[in-house]
Amino acid sequence: MDQIFPFNLPAPTAWYAVLYVVTLLLHIVFMSYVLAGSIMLGVAGIRGMLGRKGKPSDWSAVTTILKDWMPFALSAAITAGIAPLLFVQILYQQEFYTANLLSFHRWMAILPVLIVAFYLLYLLKAHRIEGKTALQGIVAMLVMACILFVGWSWVENHLLSLNRAAWAVRYEAQAMVYKDPAILPRLGYWIASALPTACLLLAWQLRAGASGVAAESAKRATRPLAWLALVSAVVAAAAAWPVIRSVLPASGAPAAQTSIRIGMAIAGVGVLLQVAGWLPARLGKPFRKAPLSLASAGAALFWLGVLMSREVARLSNIGSEAVFARHERVGTIAGFVIFLTFAVIGLGTIGWIIRSVAKARPPAPAARD
Ligand code: HEM
């Protein structure tokens, strides 16, 4: 057991690594919805399917829900990114900051780009552009480009942080963009992995009749959604190992092999459960709770296995006695009173916002009668 991640690590490092993986899992859920959702909307936009009058397509229910929920999902993805952002800085201080600083303006560009994406998503759901197919298509394509840019930036940053040999060259060249042949396949892998998770969230939404989608429209979306989820889950499973292996150093590989194998096995079981959960829908059956729950458990296992392997590969790349000693030092710095103060302020503010919104909401129709 003490050879397996995270038990093979000194306690402070193991503690931060587990917190990092668990919090990143939450970011992944919303990020998958945003990344895959923006591509679904972008492709629908390119094909002139948004705001089209006449007979609705099989995908109409999906695009209706996406248009409605993407602004919320984007803000949730951003918010859920903060906690792993904290832990990644503790775990890999030098590597993470160096990659950020080397990219600088290019890295910071994700902030305005996210703001633009956010407003475009609200524009997409605005009644003012209802029925304007071309305009909706352009807006959806812009959103897709913005979100892909942000995903690409995270991948680029991750790979640059792991490539110490590139740092000096990059600094000297003052280059804005880090070129690495591993970037595109890794981004493709993230997209393939995000798709089944997004399909799953959409399936739950369709089942719940989100955004007022009628049962008949939800039924029509069942088969294509199941097809997309199945294909992308299999592609993601096939791509996981080559992507993880690409950042595994030759020297550190033997020690990490067992943990990575276990991580990949967990991910594999997750994919099998997802396939089993999606099959009834692919065969035309309506979304039922049991298969969807099975597929959801599969998605959770898949991500757990992938994130675990991803961390093992990174730690075997940059983990060292000096890094572990720093984690131990950081672990002794306490700030419980400050944490508690800000927790109370934060929770109080959230409570106040919820109360204000609830008070400002117009009364339900029944109450008006
Ligand atoms: C909504 C747009 C976003 C997309 C599409 C996105 C996508 C991604 C992707 C693809 C990765 C994996 C990178 C890799 O392993 O190669 C990632 C990691 C991560 N993201 Fe996001 N992200 C988004 C927004 C954010 C934001 C706004 C934050 C912070 C507030 C954030 C925090 C993180 C963190 C901390 C990681 C882990 C980085 C690491 O371990 O090196 N993300 N994101």
Image (cartoon, rainbow, N blue to C red):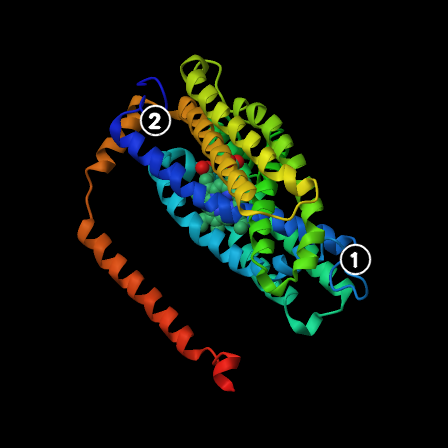
| Cα distance between the residues tagged 1 and 2 | 49 Å
Residue 270 horizontal/vertical position (percent): 52, 31
Residue 82 horizontal/vertical position (percent): 40, 49
Secondary structure, mark 1, is loop
Residue 314 makes an appearance in the image: yes
**Residue wearing tag 2:** 6
* Nearest to the observer: residue 146 or residue 43: 43
The amino acid type, in three-letter code, at marker 1 is Gly
The amino acid type, in three-letter code, at marker 2 is Pro
At 51% from the left and 81% from the top, the residue drawn is 366
**What numbered label is drawn on residue 48?**
1
> Would the CB of label 1 be found within 8 Å of ligand 1?
no
Q: Is residue 332 left or right of residue 277?
A: left
**Tag 2 or tag 1, which sits nearer the N-term?**
2
Q: Quadrant of residue 143?
A: bottom right
Residue 101 horizontal/vertical position (percent): 45, 42
At 60% from the left and 32% from the top, the residue drawn is 236
Quadrant for the N terminus, please: top left
Residue 107 makes an appearance in the image: no
At 62% from the left and 37% from the top, the residue drawn is 192
